[in-house]
Image (spheres, rainbow, N blue to C red):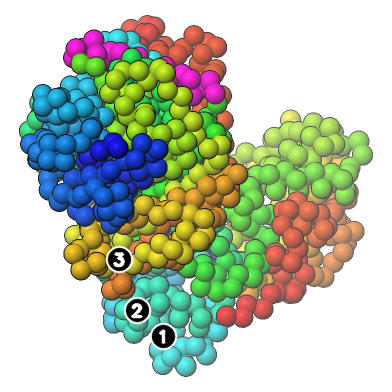
């Protein structure tokens, strides 16, 4: 998983590094292991990358000062990297210098690497090399990316920067991962994983990059081309969990979808006589608000966070996940004690964090009853497109039914949202969504 | 027979030429142009007139041409001839002219003059500003007051050099300050370099936001007659992304208003222009005879607000309205000259119009790259689609070949019952224009689209709600602040 951004200044007095930095802060929720920024100053690609949160990696003021240039790209990633050179955006210097970052997963990486005679172990580096070779062959970035998109199979929202100052943008024909475009006045264009980036750096959100579309920003134009026939399969998990509620992706407001999910939960699995609704921060808060509005059950605030906001579910190790959750969820006794509680969360992966929370509420805070409602359907399959879902044998929903899960986590009742309820909430036709992690059936990403 | 000399060579002048030639008064068209605009040249030929290739900004050259052809009057299209005193020189020679005299054209030429005038006569729709005579003072001011500003050359500089900076995120203001400083220097060193006819160099205005529109009017100094409202699109590329251009296309109608501007806003806009025309006369003692256009914006502080004035028709805005003008343009011109515009009824076809510009790659930033390419325009196919083509920066050579002049190539006009309908018609004509040497061209497919129109309506509704709230609170034309230790401060806007 990751987040990408590119900012293209239309005049050379702009210094974009700081804009990229704040964009990455706005995308931090999409990847918290490492990050990097590359800029172009008319001569060469300047870069700085490192492991850690964005504000940790770029904690020294001079780091940004050194990243000169009016064009920049950046990314955050949830995949840890031992070798700092492998952190995205990756850079290759030959045949043509290219910096590249993407959110997604390439399915034919090995076979394509062999076929093209490009020897490299790292997926991002391979994509950069492939594009560099295509660019040398065709000379024109649009022709190069069109040929590239014809060869690469998989899910990708990709931004690259050439050593000649061209910014290249591409989204696979299924558009699994989000990618949006915006601009600020007559000054710069922005491409980013989520529209919240536009708000944070003061640009205007314009539209989604469409599935199968490519853009080239250069000194003289912004060229757009529908390279591949669109076959939309938008990731449903973005709406449930990944994206920020202030983002709009694929034409749908994340906040609105999450409010609808809360209403659906209220319709499907209403708790009679509930005395308080508590949402697990942060993703499940809109679910809980809407559930409360719909059922007229009072809304409470159940938890306070300690330390930095961490996305506990995407942490690589079990230990880090537990630490994350425990710090994130310190319960407020007065909101819970003696009450029949409706606890709303976004998803259940292994069940351990839910169990932890429910036990705490029951055993230490004195909840009378705890009824768990989950704002997503049963999570039963690992994502082949790079979303961080563990393998099947670690997914509780593959192995137990709702009644069994309620006993495991210690809840009075436990329910998932139905698949239909989720599709209704998103408001995009089912055939245009990727619901693979809930159904086990993934769209085949031809071309 | 009426003989007219047209000054200028852009698509706007092509549209003026065509409207003049539609007259029932047996018109004979002459033109003085810097480039041989193929459209204007062919109209001159068709009416047995003539073309002079010369400096259309030079008063002496224009007077000479007018005398040579013994024309009944002169119509000045662009602003620079007005700034150079073409109308004044013609008057001295007793040749009637549609086009503001130098003093009146100051409304466009000097942005500082215009703002001072609006403040002096307390005309609504004015903005706070500061004019600077040197770059050091301007830069010092920028660093002292970090806020959202519009930085402008104090003189009209071919529409170039304006930069609007929204400085709203404190964490980015360091970068914004850097750009403000660099741009202020650029205004002084680049955009104002060639202009010595004005003392002010740099204008810093408060930044405003809202939907923009152009109100073009004819005036004889006594009466101001509005044309239908038009909205231009300034960003080079689709979705309003990209650097500023002279305009990539424009929409109008159906009827007098735009879908996102109300009758009341239109009327208030006309009133603002009227008051400015009166104020100019008081200030300069000159009657304003010709065209005055308000480049307007509906802002939270005022509703209708003046961004800039034009002492001419807009380009491409002229191309939206002149082809649907039903009133005889020669009669309108004569009424302007004789100061009896009040007797003329301006009538237009009740349709929506869309104009799209096609520009060579390189425009607007690197015009040397955009220049000198052989142009192909399939006029017949465009007309078959029910549209019209107006030539812009193109040069017809004696051998019949047309070459690009560096700016926009052509403007294509279409009409329909709705703006999207007109837009689709024009879009279908885009493939009929190309450069024969394979150099790329671009246009904006989104102009006139339902999607872009909805975005404008949404933006206008947002701003309208704010200025109406302010009106309800008695805050139009002022802001109230409370500053610790200083107390309540009422600022005039």
Q: Is residue A289 magenta?
A: no
Res. A305 visible in picture: yes
Which residue, given by chain and number where applicable, does mark 3 sit on? B375
Q: Residue at x 89, y 42 (%)?
A: A271
Measure the C-alpha gap from mark 1 to mark 2.
18 Å
Chain identifier of the residue bearing label 1 in the image: A
> Which residue occupies the foreground of this view, A92 or A348?
A92
Assign a secondary structure to mark 2. helix
Q: Which mark is residue B17?
A: none
Q: Is residue A421 left or right of residue A357?
A: right
Measure the C-alpha gap from mark 3 to mark 1.
48 Å
Give residue B205's quadrant in the image.
top left
Which residue, given by chain and number where applicable, does mark 1 sit on? A120
Please provide the residue range marked out in magenta.
B263-285
- Vertical order, A394 against A250 (above or below): below
Q: Are marks 1 and 2 on the same chain?
A: yes
Q: Residue at x 73, y 53 (%)?
A: A427
Give residue A343's quadrant in the image.
top right
Locate the N terminus of chain B and report the quarter of the image it occupies. Answer: top left
Q: Is residue B163 left or right of residue A340?
A: left
Residue B363: percent from left, percent from top:
28, 56
Residue B72: percent from left, percent from top:
23, 32
Which residue, given by chain and number where applicable, does mark 2 sit on? A135
């Amino acid at each position: 998983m990751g987040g990408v951004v590119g900012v293209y200044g239309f005049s050379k007095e702009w210094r974009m590094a700081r804009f990229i930095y704040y964009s990455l802060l706005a995308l931090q929720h999409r990847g918290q292991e490492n990050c990097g920024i590359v800029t172009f100053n008319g001569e060469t690609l300047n870069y700085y990358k490192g492991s850690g949160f964005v504000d940790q990696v770029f904690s020294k003021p001079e780091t940004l000062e050194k990243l000169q240039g009016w064009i920049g790209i950046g990314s955050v990633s949830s995949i840890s990297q031992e070798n700092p050179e492998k952190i995205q955006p990756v850079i290759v210097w030959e045949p043509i210098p290219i910096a590249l970052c993407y959110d997604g997963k390439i399915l034919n990486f090995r076979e394509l690497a062999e076929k093209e005679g490009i020897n490299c172990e790292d997926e991002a580096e391979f994509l950069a090399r492939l594009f560099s070779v295509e660019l040398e062959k065709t000379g024109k970035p649009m022709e190069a990316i069109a040929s590239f998109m014809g060869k690469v199979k998989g899910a990708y929202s990709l931004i690259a920067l050439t050593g000649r100052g061209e910014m290249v943008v591409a989204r696979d024909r299924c558009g699994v991962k989000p990618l949006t475009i915006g601009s600020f006045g007559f000054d710069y264009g922005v491409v980013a994983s989520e529209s919240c980036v536009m708000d944070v750096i003061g640009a205007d959100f314009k539209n989604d990059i469409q599935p199968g579309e490519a853009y080239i920003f250069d000194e003289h134009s912004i060229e757009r081309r529908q390279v591949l026939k669109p076959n939309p399969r938008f990731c449903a998990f973005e709406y449930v969990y990944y994206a920020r509620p202030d983002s709009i992706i694929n034409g749908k407001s994340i906040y609105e979808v999450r409010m609808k999910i809360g209403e659906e939960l209220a319709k499907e699995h209403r708790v009679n006589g509930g005395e308080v609704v508590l949402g697990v921060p942060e993703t499940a808060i809109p679910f809980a608000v809407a559930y409360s509005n719909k059922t007229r059950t009072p809304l409470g605030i159940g938890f306070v966070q300690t330390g930095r906001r961490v996305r506990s579910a995407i942490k690589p190790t079990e230990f880090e996940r537990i630490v994350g959750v425990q710090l994130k969820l310190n319960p407020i006794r007065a909101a819970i004690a003696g009450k029949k509680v409706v606890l709303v969360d976004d998803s259940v992966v292994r069940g351990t964090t839910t169990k932890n929370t429910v036990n705490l509420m029951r055993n230490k805070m004195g909840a009378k009853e705890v009824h768990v409602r989950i704002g997503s359907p049963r999570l039963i399959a690992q994502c082949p497109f790079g979303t961080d879902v563990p393998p099947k044998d670690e997914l509780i929903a593959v192995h137990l039914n709702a009644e069994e899960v309620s006993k495991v986590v210690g809840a009075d009742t436990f329910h998932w949202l139905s698949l239909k309820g989720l599709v209704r909430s998103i408001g995009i036709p089912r055939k245009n969504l990727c619901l693979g992690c809930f159904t086990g059936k993934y769209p085949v990403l031809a071309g | 027979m009426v003989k007219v000399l047209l000054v200028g060579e852009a698509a706007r002048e092509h549209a003026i030429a065509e409207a003049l030639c539609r007259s029932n008064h047996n018109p004979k068209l002459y033109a003085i142009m810097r480039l041989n605009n193929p459209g204007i040249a062919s109209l001159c030929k068709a009416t047995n007139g003539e073309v002079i290739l010369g400096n259309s900004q030079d008063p002496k050259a224009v007077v000479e041409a007018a005398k040579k052809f013994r024309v009944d009057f002169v119509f000045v299209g662009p602003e620079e001839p007005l700034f150079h005193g073409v109308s004044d020189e013609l008057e001295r020679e007793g040749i009637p002219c549609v086009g503001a005299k130098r003093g009146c054209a100051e409304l466009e030429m000097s942005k500082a003059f215009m703002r001072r005038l609006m403040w002096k006569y307390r005309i609504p729709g004015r903005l706070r500003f500061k004019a600077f005579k040197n770059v050091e003072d301007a830069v010092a001011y920028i660093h002292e007051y970090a806020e959202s500003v519009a930085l402008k050359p104090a003189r009209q500089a071919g529409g170039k050099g304006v930069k609007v900076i929204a400085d709203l995120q404190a964490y980015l203001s360091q970068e914004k300050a850097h750009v403000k400083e660099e741009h202020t220097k650029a205004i002084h060193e680049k955009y104002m370099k060639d202009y010595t006819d004005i003392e002010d160099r740099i204008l810093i205005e408060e930044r405003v936001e809202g939907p923009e529109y152009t109100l073009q009017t004819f005036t004889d100094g006594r009466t101001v007659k509005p044309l239908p409202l038009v909205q231009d699109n300034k960003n080079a590329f689709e979705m309003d992304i990209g650097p500023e251009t002279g305009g990539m296309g424009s929409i109008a109608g159906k009827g007098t208003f735009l879908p996102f501007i109300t009758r009341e806003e239109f009327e208030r806009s006309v009133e603002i222009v009227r008051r400015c025309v009166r104020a100019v006369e008081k200030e300069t003692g000159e009657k304003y005879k010709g065209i005055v256009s308000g480049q307007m914006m509906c802002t939270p502080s005022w509703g209708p607000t003046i961004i800039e004035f034009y002492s001419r028709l807009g380009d491409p805005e002229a191309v939206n309205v002149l082809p649907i003008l039903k009133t005889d343009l020669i009669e309108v011109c004569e009424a302007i000259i004789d100061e009896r515009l009040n007797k003329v009824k301006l009538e237009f076809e009740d349709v929506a119009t869309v104009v799209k510009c096609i520009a060579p790659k390189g425009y607007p930033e690197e015009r040397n790259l955009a220049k000198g390419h052989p142009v192909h325009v399939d006029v017949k196919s465009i007309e078959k689609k029910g549209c019209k083509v107006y030539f812009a920066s193109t040069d017809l050579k004696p051998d019949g070949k047309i070459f690009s002049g560096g700016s926009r190539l052509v403007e294509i006009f279409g009409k329909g019952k709705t703006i999207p309908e007109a837009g689709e018609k024009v879009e279908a004509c885009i493939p009929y224009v190309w450069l024969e040497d394979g150099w790329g061209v671009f246009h904006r497919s989104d102009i006139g689209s339902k999607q872009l129109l909805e975005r404008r309506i949404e933006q206008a509704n947002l701003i309208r709600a704010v200025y109406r709230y302010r009106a309800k609170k008695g805050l139009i034309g002022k802001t109230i602040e409370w500053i610790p230790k200083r107390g309540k401060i009422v600022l005039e806007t």
